[in-house]
Amino acid sequence: MEEKLALLKKWIQESDNIVFFGGAGVSTESGLPDFRSENGIFSAISEYGFRPETILSHSFFQQNPEVFFKYYKKTLLYPDANPNDCHKALAKLEAEGKLKAVVTQNIDDLHQKAGSKNVLELHGTLYRNYCVKCGQEFPLDYVTKEEGITRCNICGGVVRPDVVLYEESLNGETIQKAVEFITNADVLIVGGTSLNVYPAAGLINYYRGKKMVLINKTTTPYDNKAALIIAKSIGEVFRETVDF
């Protein structure tokens, strides 16, 4: 393990074209639950009688907005969560000109809270909200001040989080930018993700370099493509490889 960490530190020090691709495991050290582990958000039927994947779908949002809003406000919002050492290390690497982009599947805004600027949110964010009727945008505190369905104060339309629900497509512009950064990266660090969620996980296939690093506590379908695999807490890895 010490040799692996030393090699990663060397690659980071030598490169000024690093891209980070991360998933829910990046934020678990900030106290957020992941989705697909044994105790993750998707591990059981919710108290409302539906599987979380069903509640967080476009059709369910349209047909059962009351349940959708109750579930998402109670289960997905962690406004008091703080960035952990992974978020902080990535922000520092970006400030130094070494990290070119963070490509994230997370919707928690923690990379931005840590100071990262170029964050490509594949699945959107809970911190942007908009009216489905007039398009007016609202911050998170507008959504959290009341329970139940959030309504627009201008037209009365439903205000929904700017996240990609099941049955919805990822943003084409965000995907294109992610592909460009990953394709051109010297070092690609992939962390905190099982790489089982598509189409996001498929973006890894665009990497053309020889320094793909996988940091995850469990195996992934892409282990055979990685030059370096570190089965350790992602926060620990960055504490030992980046000075911040």
Image: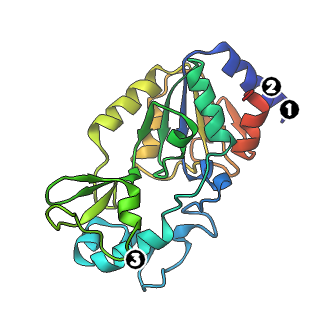
Tell me the tag on residue 185. none
Label 3 to label 1: alpha-carbon separation: 46 Å
Q: Residue at x 58, y 39 (%)?
A: 114
Q: Is residue 23 left or right of residue 38?
A: left
Residue that lies at the very extreme toward the right in this rendered image: 2
Q: Which residue is mark 1?
A: 2
**What secondary structure is marked by label 2?**
helix
Sequence-first tag of 3 and 1: 1
Q: Amino acid at mark 1?
A: Glu
State the residue position of label 3.
70
Q: Amino acid at mark 2?
A: Ala
Q: Where does the image place residue 242, in percent across and percent down from the top left?
A: 73, 28
Contact between labelled residues 1 and 2, with CB atoms less than 8 Å apart: yes
- The secondary structure type at the circle numbered 1 is helix
Residue labelled with disc 2: 6
Crowdedness near tag 2: few (<14), some (14–19) or many (≥20) residues, C-alpha within 10 Å: few
* Residue at point 64%, 53% (across, down): 30
Q: Is residue 187 visible?
A: no
Which is more N-terminal, label 2 or label 3?
Answer: 2
Identify residue type, mark 3. Answer: Lys
- Mark 3 touches mark 1? (CB < 8 Å): no
Indicate whether 240 appears above or below 44: above
The answer to whether 238 appears left or right of 16 in the picture is: right
- Give the percent coordinates (x, y) of residue 137: 26, 51
Crowding at dot 3, Cα within 10 Å, few <14 / some 14-19 / many 20+, comes out as some
Alpha carbon separation for disc pair 2 and 1: 6 Å
Q: Residue at x 49, y 27 (%)?
A: 207
The quarter of the rendered structure image containing the N terminus is: top right
Q: Position of residue 121 (x, y in %)?
A: 41, 43
